[in-house]
Image (cartoon, helix red, strand yellow):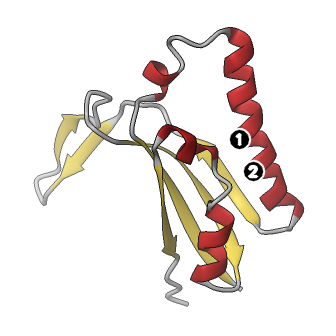
Amino acid sequence: MNKYLFSFWNAIPAEDAFANLSPEDIQAEIQKWNNWIGGIAAQGKMIATEALYPTGKTVSGSNHVITDGPFTEGKEIIGGFMLLTADSIDEAVELSKGCPIYESEGRVEVRQIQSFA
């Protein structure tokens, strides 16, 4: 079994996507995510998953230059991640296809974790 990382890329920042939704609609969106994540967890494949705040800091180069960012004004922003196990990248891709992010034209980047042990 290999480990994979799903990176969830939002085409629309979450705060903009939820701006015009009622509290009930927001809860319905959250429930879609909980159902999809729960399905993967029920298969014993999920290791961890977390949402990310839309802002942070970027540290760059050998001088460790610190800048604000990423910025939600950007075209895409990573909104969270999931670490899971799968037999192959093809299986991981199939598991990603149920993600609710696709409904808002977002994307899931699927990457295998490289083991150095």
> Which of these two is toward me, 90 or 113?
90
Which residue, as the protein is rendered here, is positioned at the far right? 42
At horizontal 59% and vertical 13% (from top left) the residue drawn is 21
The quadrant of the picture occupied by the C terminus is bottom right
For mark 1, what is the residue?
A: 33
Numbered circle sitting on residue 37: 2
- Residue 85, quarter of the rendered image: bottom right
| Disc 1 residue crowd, few under 14, some 14–19, many 20+, Cα 10 Å | some
In the rendered view, would you say 70 is above or below 84? above
In the rendered view, would you say 107 is above or below 100? below
Dot 1: element: helix
> Which of these two is toward me, 66 or 73?
73
Where's residue 48, x and y in %? 69, 56
Where's residue 103, x and y in %? 56, 41
The quadrant of the picture occupied by the N terminus is bottom right
Amino acid residing under circle 1: Trp
Q: CA distance from mark 1 to mark 2?
A: 6 Å
Amino acid residing under circle 2: Ile
In the rendered view, would you say 86 is above or below 109? below
